[in-house]
């Protein structure tokens, strides 16, 4: 570990440079392939889009096909938001758009002109954690951590949804103000899957924040 | 995913006109179904018309005591609306039984009323209001429950997605 100071390379940095060198050697082949593009292949379309991410305005030119998730990760290097299933079922890609939680894998970047987006990086910093982040650490609300950014973004939105009086599938009385029971919490968080099974600790963390004790 | 051109429509008439003149055009609102199918190249639109800016996101009472639901009202908002919870609890329940909180925040009622909510909506024989290309083409057409119309799925899908910038449902109360 003595070398670590003078030989600084992260796992991500290594992977990126390795991928770069592979791409460089593949360039002549790629050019040939492009020249022999078969008829009927549609050319890539690039479009402009501007939105605010974690308080900073971003003006981008992106392939119209790119999802909000891939834009955050590949264009803005906000890799806290994770890609799990890429089809809206696992919740790892959950971010807040205009204050509401959505699956960033099932929406295109170009559909978010003028929107305000908050990712896990925008909730808190390592020095000043968001109460939900602090509660997840305190209650051990994860093992591998892959689903955690999505879990935390989702949990923050869940507390807002309960505050706004939005009912859930397990609310007994649709017209009463919802209470954040364990059953309510589990139902509302059901769009976030944790392969490690840290659910009971996740419930503890969110419950604590909901009671204002984090 | 196949490449496509993209536009943000500013009015239902503009959206309808654009869909009429562009080959292989599709509307996108919530995107939860369409994007999934586009990734698998089951859907391969050449042009995508984003209708999210059309301000069709209101739920209003009608003089007959029913509700007029904008096509862009999200599933979460329809399920949580006070009048829906009070007078149409089955609809609220059906919406809340579908998908996840994240998806319900995205899915619009015009194109994705969810498999659970669709029969409840149909039970009230909703009238669908449409806007077409060209002149002001507006029709009120009643949709029927499955027992009365076996082709209901196709009709609803077509009514809600292909040619119409605007779809709303007017209905009587539950029970």
Image (spheres, coloured by chain):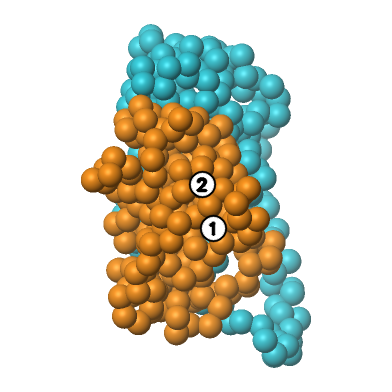
Chain colours: A cyan, B orange
Q: For the point 30% across and 75% down, which residue is it?
A: B136
Pinpoint the chain carrying mark 1: B
Figure quadrant of residue B153: bottom right
Residue A21 x, y percent position in the rendering: 70, 66
Residue A53 x, y percent position in the rendering: 37, 49
Q: For the point 49% across and 63% down, which residue is it?
A: B159
Secondary structure of the residue carrying tag 1 is helix
Pinpoint the chain carrying mark 2: B
Q: For the point 33% across and 48% down, which residue is it?
A: B68
Figure quadrant of residue B151: bottom right
Q: Which residue is mark 1?
A: B156
A151 sits left or right of A40 in the view? left
Q: Which residue is mark 2?
A: B122
Residue B67 seen in the figure: yes
**Label 1 crowd (10 A; few <14 / some 14-19 / many >=20):** some
- Nearest the camera: A29 or B90? B90
Residue A135 seen in the figure: no
The answer to whether mark 2 and mark 1 are in CB contact below 8 A is yes
Q: For the point 74% across and 73% down, which residue is it?
A: A25
- Nearest the camera: B10 or B147? B147
Does B4 sit above or below residue A127? below
């Amino acid at each position: 570990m003595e070398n670590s100071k003078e030989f600084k390379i992260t796992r991500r940095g290594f992977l990126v440079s390795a991928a770069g060198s592979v791409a460089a050697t593949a360039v002549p082949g790629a050019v040939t392939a492009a020249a022999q593009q078969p008829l009927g292949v549609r050319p890539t379309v690039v479009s402009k889009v501007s939105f605010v991410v974690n308080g900073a305005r971003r003006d981008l030119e992106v392939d119209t096909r790119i999802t909000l998730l891939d834009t955050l990760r590949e264009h803005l290097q906000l890799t806290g938001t994770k890609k799990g299933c890429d089809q809206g079922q696992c919740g790892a890609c959950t971010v807040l758009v205009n204050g509401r939680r959505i699956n960033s894998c099932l929406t295109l970047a170009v559909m978010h002109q003028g929107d305000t987006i908050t990712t896990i990086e925008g909730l808190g910093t390592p020095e000043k954690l968001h109460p939900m982040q602090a509660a997840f650490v305190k209650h051990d609300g994860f093992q591998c951590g892959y689903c955690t950014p999505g879990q935390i973004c989702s949990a923050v939105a869940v507390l807002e949804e309960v505050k706004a009086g939005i009912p859930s599938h397990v609310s007994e009385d649709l017209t009463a103000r919802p209470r954040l029971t364990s059953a309510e919490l589990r139902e509302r968080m059901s769009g976030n899957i944790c392969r490690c099974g840290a659910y009971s600790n996740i419930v503890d963390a969110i419950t604590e924040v909901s009671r204002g004790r984090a | 995913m196949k490449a496509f051109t993209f536009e943000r429509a500013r009015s239902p008439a503009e959206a309808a006109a654009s869909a009429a003149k562009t080959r292989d055009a599709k509307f996108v609102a919530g995107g939860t179904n369409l994007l999934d199918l586009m990734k698998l190249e089951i859907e391969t639109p050449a042009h995508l018309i984003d209708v999210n800016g059309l301000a069709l996101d209101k739920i209003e009472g009608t003089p007959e005591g029913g509700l007029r639901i904008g096509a862009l009202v999200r599933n979460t908002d329809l399920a949580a609306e006070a009048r829906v919870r009070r007078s149409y609890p089955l609809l609220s329940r059906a919406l809340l039984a579908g998908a996840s909180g994240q998806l319900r925040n995205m899915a619009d009622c015009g194109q994705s009323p969810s498999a659970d909510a669709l029969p409840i909506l149909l039970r009230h024989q909703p009238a669908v209001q449409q806007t077409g290309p060209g002149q002001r083409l507006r029709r009120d057409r009643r949709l029927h429950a499955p027992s009365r119309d076996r082709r209901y799925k196709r009709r609803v899908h077509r009514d809600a997605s292909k040619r119409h910038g605007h779809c709303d449902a007017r209905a009587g109360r539950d029970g």
